[in-house]
Amino acid sequence: MTLIPQQVFDRLPSAIIVIDDQRRVMHANKSAVSLIGENALNRDLSLSLRHPVILDSADDVLAGATERAGEITIPAPVAQSFTFHVERLHDAPLPDGSFATLVLDDVTSAHKTEEMRASFVANVSHELRSPLTAIIGFIETLRGPASDDVDARQRFLSIMHRESQRMARLIDDLLSLSRVEVNEHVAPQDAVDVTQTLHNVMEALQPQAAIKRIKLNLNADKSTPVALGDADQLHQVFRNLIENAIKYSSDDSAVEVSSKSVARVPGSARPGLSVTVHDQGPGIPKSLIPRLTERFYRIDEARSNTAETGMSSTGLGLAIVKHIVNRHRGHMTAQSEIGIGSTFTVYLPAHPDQNAI
Ligand code: ADP
């Protein structure tokens, strides 16, 4: 029999435990030791891995079964799920006493990913379903009871228009999010004039701000360096932040946007710039701030009713911002005080060649 060196076993991600015919632990590779501890060696398996399904399976194999397999969850200290496989090595114990192997594979993150995928699909379906249900309802009314009612027709058509725009916005946001995620690991390399980008975004949002008589003020410090980034994605970051500031603020308030240079981007050693969007809106409870960048997270439905300016709420805006900022190796912070307003700050690395534009 060829003996495989211990180092090879230690490099395997699976936890491999070899037991004797008395269920004592004879060998354990590195992954197994981190699971059952150093003291497990030469002692009964039940002293280090107290899971009834595993122990029963090991007993079955020791009593004559060739193999047993299944899945278990160990609840403490943090719930972890494993697939396991117990198998007899030989009809009789080997000279060193080895008799059976127990192999465990951690499938916790695979389960989590699957849960996230399922809840994502459920959320998307729900978000698309509501406007679609409204549109179908109005089409039915227009074909039946309201077919000759000119006033109702105009009213219903405008609601259908709004609901279909909501669906289009949701699909656009989902596509943006998946595009950003696909190349999040590739840092962008363009030189971006952030001051000009802010100017363009604010000009484009002026009509929505005007509906609520909200003043948009830009204070771009001359020190603001050229950013190392992706121009379209940065446009989207600033658009989402300034749009939120307008969307959630009350009429006759002001949104202040400013930019300046910073010695270092937080969490990195690189010099950069910061862009701050400050509003006088309702504010966000401190405990909810960490949740803002979760997909589909909205503080409350009432606040998200923004039909007035035609800016609908998908709950994806800040998730997109977070992923774009991550891709830029930047950083984002949010501060807020109830009744006073919110301040979102994005930090971005500066382009190494400041004459690149
Ligand atoms: P949405 O499309 O709903 O605006 P976001 O991801 O951009 O999605 O924002 C998530 C939620 O955070 C919003 O629904 C809103 O409740 C809250 N929010 C975001 N920005 C602000 C702000 N400037 N002031 C108050 N609440 C905000």
Image (tube, rainbow, N blue to C red):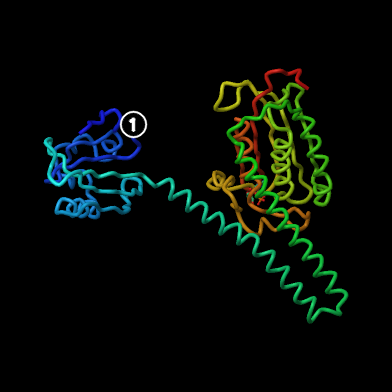
- Which quarter shows the C terminus? top right
Residue 156 vertical placement versus 173 (above, below): below
Provide residue 64's location: percent of width, then percent of height.
15, 54
Q: Residue furthest bottom?
A: 145
Which residue is at a point 60% across and 30% down the rendered structure image?
Answer: 329
User: Which residue is nearer to you in this view: 334 or 31?
Assistant: 31
Give the labeled residue for mark 1: 11
Badge 1 amino acid:
Arg
Tell me if 37 is positioned left or right of 132 in this view.
left
Q: Position of residue 88 (x, y in %)?
A: 20, 47
Q: Which quarter of the rendered picture does the N terminus lie within?
A: top left
Is 134 placed above or below 181 here?
A: below
- Farthest right residue in view: 150
Q: Secondary structure at mark 1?
A: helix
> Position of 324 compared to 44: left or right?
right
Classify residue 349 as left or right of residue 222.
left
Using the image as rendered, state which of residue 357 and residue 266 is in the foreground.
357
Q: Determine if the C-beta at disc 1 is less than 8 A from ligand 1.
A: no
Give the camera-side residue of 194 and 21.
21
At horizontal 52% and vertical 52% (from top left) the residue drawn is 117
Query: Badge 1: how crowded within 10 Å, few (<14), some, or many (20+)?
Result: few
